Image: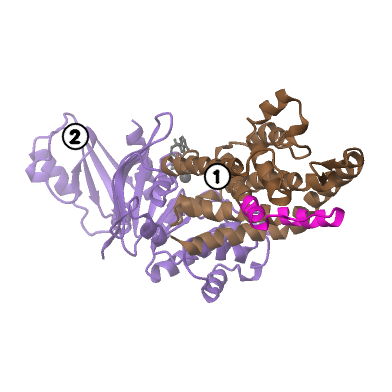
Amino acid sequence: MSTILEIRDLKKSYDGGFEALKGVNLSIEEGEIIALLGPNGAGKTTLISAICGIITPTSGSVTVGGHDIRTDFRTTRTMIGLVPQEVSLEPFERVISTVRFSRGLFGKRGNDALIESILKRLSLWDKRNAQIKELSGGMKRRVLIAKALAHEPRVLFLDEPTAGVDVELRKDMWDIVADLKADGVTIILTTHYIEEAEAIADRIGVIAKGEILLVEDKHALMQRMGKKELEVQLNAPLDALPDSLKSDAVRLGPDGSSLIYTYDTRAERTGITKLLSDVAAEGLVLRDVVTRQSSLEDIFVTLVKEDAA
Amino acid sequence: MNWTAIKSIYVFEMTRFFRTFLQSLISPVLSTSLYFVVFGAAIGSRINEVEGVSYAAFIVPGLIMLSVMTQGISNGSFGIYFPKFIGTIYELLSAPVNFLEIVLGYVGAAATKAMFIGTIILITAFFFVDITILHPAAMVLFLVLTCVSFSLFGFIIGIWAKNFEQLQLVPLLIVTPLVFLGGSFYSISMLPPVWQAISMFNPVVYLISGFRWAFFGIADVPIGVSLLAIAGFTGLCLLVIGWIFRTGWRIRE
Ligand SMILES: Nc1ncnc2c1ncn2[C@@H]1O[C@H](COP(=O)(O)OP(=O)(O)OP(=O)(O)O)[C@@H](O)[C@H]1O
Ligand SMILES: [Mg+2]
């Protein structure tokens, strides 16, 4: 797989000096689905807007397929499709003409067969001659997706595509995303639903206050979730992990005042006895021992909280 | 150049125009007819001739200019303000088009609409008065340049405006008075000397004078000066648009 989107040290300060992006670095592989999670105001929409050309970044660089978004904007924008967070459509337009318009705007010749297949896939074919104002909220959101797909983008940004969408439609949306992935489209989506990220993403990124806090393979993250954590709180903080305790499963907690041991509850041996005897052998004094089951939601909340502190 | 995109914007805007075709036409045709009745018939029966042209015919170029200028401004400003207002501008900004292409699409459509309405008014006028056009090529040139420059001007207003009040402000407070005082309904030479001097500061005077010259061969100012004025105004609008293009003022800030 090759990198299709490379974001380097991207910063954005809005008028008035508010820094919405504080140097974002992110590489996205061709064909993957990455979900960006983050609280309100984290900078998700700002990041997407900067990549798509809606706002001008203050500094930093973005390349799409190796092309710079500023010097080679025609190439990069032709490759990108954007479904914005806000539903903005012209109320009196007809569904099919607004989708055709999008294709033309991106410089592509008319292709009615393609537009028909997009509308059918999004269950909008029956509504093709309806005016936008006659559609329900979920249908409007699908019109936005149809517009974004009309020029056959290779990279698709979905900014909260399932906000305000019912359960059934959300599942539909997930299927559509899976179809697109099968066609080789790279998808970057933002969401507030953690189970959505779990359901469709290959990788998960967490963003808060304009910074990327974590980007990790979903399965690695899930594995961490399927496991339990044992936190051994120490009387005196450590600078580094003692050699005898070094293993993949053990890491130093924040401030070095605890050891965090990850283990699989379903395994025959959890390794807890060995860990505790190793700790004793190192001469470390325990203050308390806590166990917990981590979920993606926990990881998310902890990360964001740590960042706020 | 992304010609497909320009064409898409142009066609999209024209479709909007034709969708409300009747509304778009009824109002200018009706108001022009009213002008003919009020000014042409009522006042014209007292003035009867201005510089050898019947008064009813004399006001035709001014009436056309009046409509074309206000239509150019309102179409040009609304065309770009509307996407800004409802948020669909995201699509223009994320599309592989530069600002020049956006301007060509929107201003081209706005100018076409203004041309359309100007032509309709001219046709309406033929029903009321006998008109002969002495310099048809110059007439068309003036008409086109006025449509284009005022649509450009409208486009700038549409980019600048942050709300509907501002969108209406410039046309209402500046353009309408200038147009009415620009000699649509009278010859500048009919004014007292002081007002003649003041009128020379009104750019619209030069446009109406030039346009009227194309019809009847009579003018308040030399035709060359009129041409210079319209070219200068177009150039000024282009400069401002070029600056907006480079800075992203009120669009990508
Ligand atoms: N045009 C603007 N001018 C000034 N500040 C802005 C502007 N747009 C966004 N911001 C600020 O930038 C920060 C990031 O906003 P952004 O819309 O990117 O957040 P988000 O992660 O998309 O949030 P949400 O989940 O609510 O959509 C917020 O603090 C917001 O107030
Ligand atoms: Mg957002």
Q: Is residue B171 left or right of residue A100?
A: right
Which is more toward the observer, A263 or A268? Answer: A263
| Helix, strand or loop at mark 2 | helix
Q: Is residue B110 left or right of residue A172?
A: right
Which chain is depicted purple? A
Mark 2, chain letter?
A
Q: How is the image coloured?
A: by chain
Q: Is residue A158 left or right of residue A283?
A: right
**Residue B97 falls within the magenta-colored stretch:** no
Which residues lie in the magenta part? B118-144
Q: Position of residue A137 (x, y in %)?
A: 62, 55
Mark 2 CB lies closer than 8 A to ligand 1: no
Q: Mark 1 packing: few (<14 Cα in 10 Å), some, or many (20+)? A: some
Residue where numbered disc 1 is placed: B231
Q: CA distance from mark 2 to mark 1?
A: 74 Å
Chain B shade in the render:
brown
The C terminus of chain A - image quarter: top left
| Helix, strand or loop at mark 1 | helix
Which is more toward the observer, A159 or A272? Answer: A159
Q: Mark 2 packing: few (<14 Cα in 10 Å), some, or many (20+)? A: some
Q: Residue at x 17, y 31 (%)?
A: A237
